[in-house]
Structure formats: C-alpha cells, structure tokens
Amino acid sequence: MEQFDQIVITHQKRVYNICLRLCGNPDDAFDLSQEVFLKAWRGFEDFRGDSAIYTWLYRLAVNACADFTRKKARRGEPVSLDDVDLPLPDTRFEPSIALERKELARSLEQALKQLSPEHREIVVLRETAELSYAEIAGMLGLEEGTVKSRLARARLALRDILIRDGNKPAQNASKQGRKEAGGHGTL
C-alpha cells in the first residue's frame, strides 16, 4: 500500500503536532498519532474523498485526542498541557528580541492551557495546523461562520488571560514574530 505510506510520510509530523498541542504530552502525542494512522489505514479503503486527506486525518486526530482526554478525566487523572515545549522557530535576531519572543511564546502556551477544549481545538487547528475556516468547519461539523465566531471568542479569551496574568498585548512585536515564524498573524 505505497499510496498510504506516502500519506503517512507527508502528514505524520503535522498529525503529531496536533496531538501534542491537544493532549500536552509528547509520549501520549506519539501514541495518539500512531493510533490515528492505524485508524486511517483500517478505514483507508472506505475513504470517499469528500474532503482532503489531511482534513480527514486531522479529524481523526482531534477525535482521538478528545477521547483520550475524556478517558483521562474519567479516571481522575489530571489533564494538563504542562509537558508541551513550544520551540521558537527563528533565533536569527538579537538576544533581547529572542528573549521577548520566548517569553511571549511561554505566555501564549500558558494561556492556551487555560482555554476550554473547544476553544483550544479551534485555535490549534487554525494557528498550528494552518487549516482554513472551511477545512475546520468540515472537520468539526460546524458552519464556517460558527468556526469564525468561536475562533474570535477564543482569541478574546486568550487576550483576557494574557492581560489578567500581567502580560501586555505587545501587538507589534507579536505580529512581527508570527510573520517571521510563518504564522497567520491573527492571534
């Protein structure tokens, strides 16, 4: 099944990153991403192509992480993103700017942990996976307008958390950092 091998090679890193952002633990993310590809392999012949292959994979990943989180909560285990380490993608600039970016990334990481699972999922799919509103809507079974409004509410919640925790929204610095890192520049 050479075609499926190519799908795994093409999408494994992005699927792992989605799992990592949603479950918060590198080991669990690895296991969950393997589970995603196992489910995909088992269901590959039934894939009708109604959506792009990566949209289908991300839906499987989101579902696997949601199931994992629910099972963990039922067992009374803490559901935490404390193990997530978000490396900064660009270190070419002077140390003070790199330090500022690192502090901003840490603040955003902490704020992301405080969002509801629904808001965190939307932010991760849009900002980390860089999926379009239409792709997210298809994955989550929502209207595109609902995705946009939830994302807007999630961004407002992130801003409020950052301000509450003593972080001033440094719009120029954060926008510049996202552009250089290849992000959307919308958070």
Image (cartoon, rainbow, N blue to C red):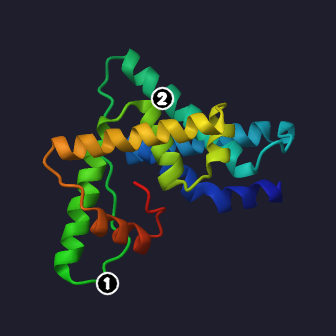
User: From the viewer's perspective, is the residue at label 2 or at label 1 nearer?
Assistant: 1
Side of 27 where 13 appears, left or right = right
Q: Is residue 152 above or below residue 76?
A: below
* Residue at (67, 62) in percent of width and height: 10
Amino acid type for the residue under numbered disc 1: Arg
Q: Residue at x 46, y 45 (%)?
A: 123
> As rendered, which of 55 and 135 lies closer to the eye?
135
The reply, left or right, for residue 37 in relation to residue 171 is right
Other residues around mark 1 within 10 Å, as few (<14) / some (14–19) / many (≥20):
few
Label 2 with label 1: CB-CB less than 8 Å: no
Q: Is residue 133 visible?
A: yes
The answer to which quarter of the image holds residue 110 is top left
* Residue 50, position as x, y percentages in the image: 83, 42
Location of mark 1 (residue): 92
Identity of the residue furthest to the left in this view = 166
Residue nearer the viewer, 1 or 124: 124
Labelled disc at residue 68:
2
Image quadrant containing the N terminus = bottom right
Secondary structure at badge 1 equals loop
x and y percentages locating residue 78 in the rendered image: 29, 27
